[in-house]
Image (cartoon, rainbow, N blue to C red):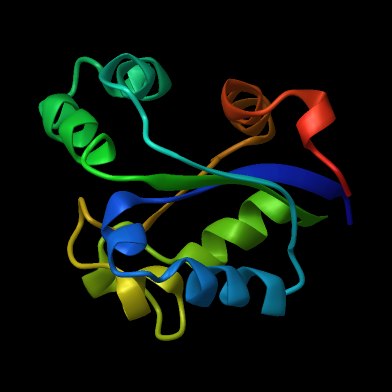
Amino acid sequence: MAIERTLSIIKPDATERNLTGKINALFEDSGLRIVAQRRIRLSREQAETFYEVHKERSFFGELVDYMISGPVVAQVLEGENAIAHHREIMGATNPANAEPGTVRKEFALNVQENSVHGSDSVETAAKEISFFFSDADIVG
């Protein structure tokens, strides 16, 4: 198995409800390590740039508005097959379809306010991690 790094974002709905520790406990208890972490409030420009891949989608404006509505916790998780492992722990995008014990089943409010974001590939992870962190910020 390969050791990978993935970007994880704890979204505004979860930070507002003070769930950062509970969500991170699920990640850490499953074997992932937090090797970088930062609590920030995204600007509109940052959110638009980060979610640029969705720019032509009908939900883009709502997504950006949501992501700037409160602080987020951006972090780098590391572990064996971290990308797939993290996505499994997050659960399905729609919390109604998520497995019990996953972040989204336990904490998400709805499809948009689904508490977490995670990279979906090695390439995306590298791009997303570099959006928030320099190599010097990542300590493992």
Badge count: 0
From the viewer's perspective, tell me whether residue 64 is left or right of residue 99.
left
In which quarter of the view is residue 55 placed? top left
Residue 117 location (% of width, % of height)? 44, 48
| Above or below 52: residue 29 | below
From the viewer's perspective, tell me whether residue 135 is left or right of residue 72.
right
| Above or below 115: residue 11 | above
From the viewer's perspective, tell me whether residue 12 is left or right of residue 57.
right
In which quarter of the view is residue 106 placed? bottom left
| Above or below 55: residue 47 | below
Q: Residue at x 40, y 79 (%)?
A: 99
| Above or below 50: residue 138 | below
From the viewer's perspective, tell me whether residue 66 is left or right of residue 30.
left
Residue 21 location (% of width, % of height)? 53, 72
In which quarter of the view is residue 119 placed? top right
Q: Residue at x 41, y 71 (%)?
A: 19
Residue 50 location (% of width, % of height)? 42, 22
Q: Quadrant of the N terminus?
A: bottom right
* Residue furthest to the bottom: 100
Query: 80 or 39, which lies in front?
Result: 39
Q: Residue at x 26, y 58 (%)?
A: 13
Query: 90 or 75, which lies in front?
Result: 75
Q: Residue at x 31, y 14 (%)?
A: 45
